[in-house]
Amino acid sequence: MAGITARGEPVEILEVDELDPPAADEVLLDVAAAGIGNWDELVRIGSWPLGGPAPMALGTEAAGTVVAVGSRVAEVREGDEVMTHPLPLRRHGTWAGMVLAPAATVAPRPSAAPWEAVGAFPIPALTAAQALDEALGIESGGWVVVNGAGGVTGGLLVQLAAARGARVIATASAKKGERVRGYGASEVLDYRDDWPALVREITGGGASKAVNAARGQAATTLKAVADGGCLATITGDPPREERGVAVFDVYVRPDGRQLAALAELLACGTLSVPIASVRPLEEAAQALREVVAGADGAIVLSLRN
């Protein structure tokens, strides 16, 4: 497994004791692929205290095969192929050969989707749904701004908003504009321009709803929202409310049923995850550094040869 010997220490390959059998409400997964996100860096440095005690494997999302189920688990069986955002972590994260997951956090793996895409799907997909459907309550035909659409989560925000029937104005770099437009955005603006002013011009005063997926840019995104509108930010930097704009600070939560519904959209191609690279477990440290630096797509750990 790949993890840390203490909070703040570098990622390294570890040998630790085998996991206990699953509790009554848990399942044990043989991990096939595990996603990597900025959130894993927060766990490494101790800003997001999960799992442990160290030494412990990192990782907060995965896809794999169920090899054992707890005594009270009815909807999941041995041999099922599933994906999960398995919080709370009982001991280790998902960058391990085996991981324990609460049964309520798992969802069926779409058989047509590659393991790598499924392993990188749970956290960004759940984040997108919880920001758009729950915090903002987007509506068909309404304008919604997605700032930071070039990232994995930002791309899923655009795709899901478009699938819900919203008219999406997205920001991204020029080189990612074509991809974001392919996700269903009505307008794609270069984030280096004064894009909030362009949003107000396009919408005639500002979008009624917006979501920020760019670190440190929630206050800028607020400028693109009409008076009395709504802003959700997934980057932990909510600005003060002004002009009657409601501000929501969204932190992803595990939800197997919600993930299952999103998996159906992945299965039919409505949602997709761009994969930048697939790495062996031995390259986890370098892969995490590349994600934090800003990879062009998801970087995924493959745990099966």
Image: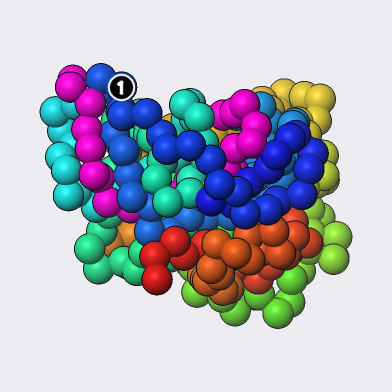
Q: Position of residue 124 (x, y in %)?
A: 52, 49
**Residue type pointed to by label 1:** Ala
Residue holding disc 1: 23
Rendered location of residue 272, percent (x, y): 42, 65
In the shown orientation, is residue 272 left or right of residue 205?
Answer: left
Residue at the location (75% across, 34% down)? 7
Residue depicted at 22% across the width and 33% down the height: 69
Q: Is residue 30 magenta?
A: no
Q: Nearer the viewer, residue 5 or 238?
A: 5
Give the vertical position of 190 relative to 219 (above or below). Answer: below
> Mark 1 falls on what kind of element?
loop
The reply to whether residue 136 is visible in this rendering is no
The residue depicted at 52 percent of the width and 55 percent of the height is 35
Within the image, what quadrant is residue 265 found in? bottom left
**Viewer-side residue, 287 vs 146:** 287
Q: Residue at point 44% right, 61% down? A: 303
| Coloration mode | rainbow
- Image location of residue 88, percent across then percent down: 48, 26
122 up-or-down from 234: above or below? below
Question: In this image, 269 relative to 303: left or right?
Answer: left
Q: Please determine whether, in this image, residue 277 is positioned above or below residue 220.
A: below
Residue 249 horizontal/vertical position (percent) = 66, 29
Q: Quadrant of residue 162?
A: bottom left
Q: Is residue 22 visible?
A: yes
Q: Residue 71 magenta-drawn?
A: yes
Q: Which residues are magenta?
A: 51-72
